[in-house]
Image (cartoon, coloured by chain):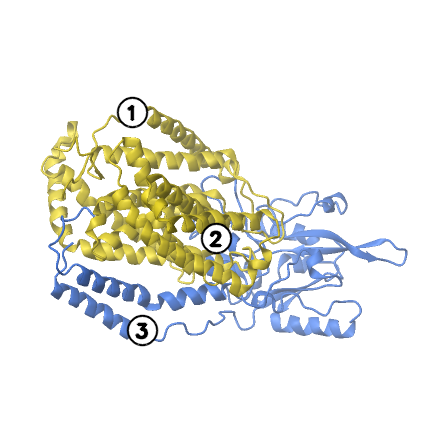
Chain colours: A blue, B yellow
Amino acid sequence: MQITRRRFFRVMGAAGASVAVRPPAGHAWQSKAPPDPFGCLVDLTRCVGCRKCEEACAEVNGLPEPERVNCQCTIFEKDRRPDHDAYTVVNRYYTGKVDEFDKPVPTFAKVQCMHCQDPACVSACIVGALTKDETGAVRYDVTKCIGCRYCMVACPFEIPAYEYFDPITPKVMKCTFCYDRISKQGGVPGCATICPTEAITFGRRSTLLEVANKRLKENPAHYLPHIYGEKEVGGTSWMYLSGVPFEQVNLPALPETPSPKLSETVQHSLFTYLWSPILLFGVLGGLMAWFNKNDNPPDKGGV
Amino acid sequence: MAHAAQPLKRPLWTPGVLVMLVFMFAGAVAIIARFTGGIGYVTNLTNARPWGIWVGIDVATGVALAAGGFTTAALAHIFGRHYYEPVTRPALLTAVLGYTFVVIGLLVDIGRSWAIWKPMFYWNFNSVLFEVAMCVMIYLTVLYIEFLPIVAEQFKGRVNLPGILSGLNRLVDGFLQTADRILGKVMWVFIILGVVLSCMHQSSLGSLMLVAPTKLHPLWYTPILPLLFLTSAIAVGYPMVVFETTLTTASFKLDSEVKILAPLTKITIFLLGFYMVLKIGDMVMRGTWIYLLDGTYQTNSFLAELLFGVMIPWIMLLFKRVRQSARGVFTAAALIVGGVVLNRVNVFIVGYRSPLTESGYFPAPSEILVTLGLIATLMFIYRVVVTYLPVLQAPKEVSS
């Protein structure tokens, strides 16, 4: 517990030097989004709820066959979410829209990982098991995962699912954007390949935005003037067009700020080059030397 | 020193200890179930609600309540207030045990417990959790180093291991001798390091929820959440020492430490007051007070946290009559401790709203048993340690 003057100044000198060389803390947060990733445009006005995408997804990714594969009726009675057995699901919503015979018109909506441009899950993952790839896919590396589930806490779309009943080697389960396919020339995700009504369009994100804007312009009465995913949480690779409000089909209203912006700014401005802990160490060391200068060392150790 | 810390040498197997054993056994059964059937088998966690009481109580609250360790170390050793040294050892022990059990709680909670070492090799500097994990890991090591001299003091020169282990006597004794000699000289580094690391991860625990702006209720989601976590941890440090010292001295029928504890509460008026100003100021600045009278369980929980955990004990401590009575000091301290517990539970559980799925989460019985089992084990080991190691001030009449 004793602290001699000379030793103290040596340590403080080192601490001071490391603080002096640090660059100005808190430089502005920058998006790490890939410049022009792939994406998918889902046009909810075209979806007929055939659930072929669910089937194709399960096949491509080696998941169990979807529940009641050929049933387009009772399956829609419950609101489903993607889980450890399904990377994507289609739900049916009645939003008050009626046809010419006053019969309610359903809207079908497919959900899967949105592959955010600045994903909260990637920022949160303690070991970097989740990464945003150049293709736009948010990829999961099970060999790094420790199962903390912070990615699930972070995701604003409530997407990552967990193998809660695997006691030793559970995995985080979510849409892979069929990475093995889209990373090859001409590859298209399973769901986008099979969709019979072309409700899912695969392509470069910039191209998809053009396509979407064109559809909005040509048929303004058909759509709400909003491309969901263009700006939500800083933009997502998957985007939606719809004729009914997005919140009514379980696509949450979200701010335009990327989710990780605040936490990363706070962390980095505090801990870049560990300047604040080193400074704190120096200050406390100084105080300790000052307050204890007249004391004989108290009983050694045994704090 | 008038009367130094001593092993208590009281009988260990009291009825209270047997009750703890029952809880420990039940917790162990639940932990076995978790490692055979999976997390889903013993908890009510879902995809919409990935964190429950194991994170909210075992980890977040455990870390906050271990704050007595670094706050008393700072007071007695850094700021040179040696008057408070009698309470630093029990506070240090609480911190050592608290953090050890944070790690054990995490081992139960994370899906791949065997992979817990991976953050040491795969670094994600953007992850707040990474920073927390690193600090907790290093700080736990620092705590064990700080505790080593207490072990040395008791066993140095008289290591006497049973049976075949006796061959190691010389080696262990040599280790204790050397450690004691070296640590005496460099302990100041670890004392300061402990305070620095605590400040880092106490605040970062608050930053954990910053990445989920749409999921935490606005009453708690604020950019100054890290500062609130840090200041509340510092404010709860001394009340926690008061709380546990009072319980310990009452339970072991030791001399009351109220003389030392009373001035601690005076510091608490300032620390807790600072936290209260921040918390209320933040609410006013962001205009979130409009939610206060919503009547939902979330806003009610916030009100309870603020009223019973901060404002009432703060007002109580303003009165000299309260500060001078053992009962008054204990009640105020207990309220503050309860307030911080509720705050952590609120931030990680009550205030968490899953955006799409209704997820009314209430912990499953086996989830609760694991938590109770861990707390019982912690209390049991505390008792074992103070029985055999010099941590507490022995009552005067027994001291030789």
Disc 2 to disc 1, how far (Cα)? 41 Å
Relative placement, left or right, of B50 versus A195 is left
Between B2 and A301, the one nearer to me in the picture: B2
Q: How crowded is mark 1: few (under 14 residues within 10 Å), some or many (20 or more)?
A: few
The residue located at (42%, 53%) in the rendering is A144
Relative placement, left or right, of A242 versus B356 is right
Task: Look at the image and tell me whether residue B187 can be seen.
Answer: yes
Q: Residues within 10 Å of mark 2 (few under 14, many from 20)?
A: many
Q: Name the residue under label 2.
A: A150
Picture coordinates of residue B242 (x, y %)? 32, 43
- Front position among marks 1 and 3: 1
Q: Mark 3 points at which residue?
A: A22
SS for dot 3: loop
Between B9 and A164, the one nearer to me in the picture: B9
Identify which amino acid the numbered label 2 is placed on: Tyr
Chain for numbered disc 1: B
The residue located at (10%, 35%) in the rendering is B158
Picture coordinates of residue A273 (x, y %)? 32, 68
Disc 1 to disc 3, how far (Cα)? 57 Å
- Kindly check if marks 2 and 3 are in contact, taking CB atoms under 8 A apart as contact: no
SS for dot 2: helix
Disc 2 to disc 3, how far (Cα)? 31 Å
Q: Name the residue under label 1.
A: B13
Relative placement, left or right, of A66 versus B45 is right
Between B162 and B307, the one nearer to me in the picture: B307
Chain for numbered disc 2: A
Between B155 and B32, the one nearer to me in the picture: B155
Task: Give the number of marks.
Answer: 3
- Kindly check if marks 1 and 3 are in contact, taking CB atoms under 8 A apart as contact: no
Identify which amino acid the numbered label 1 is placed on: Trp
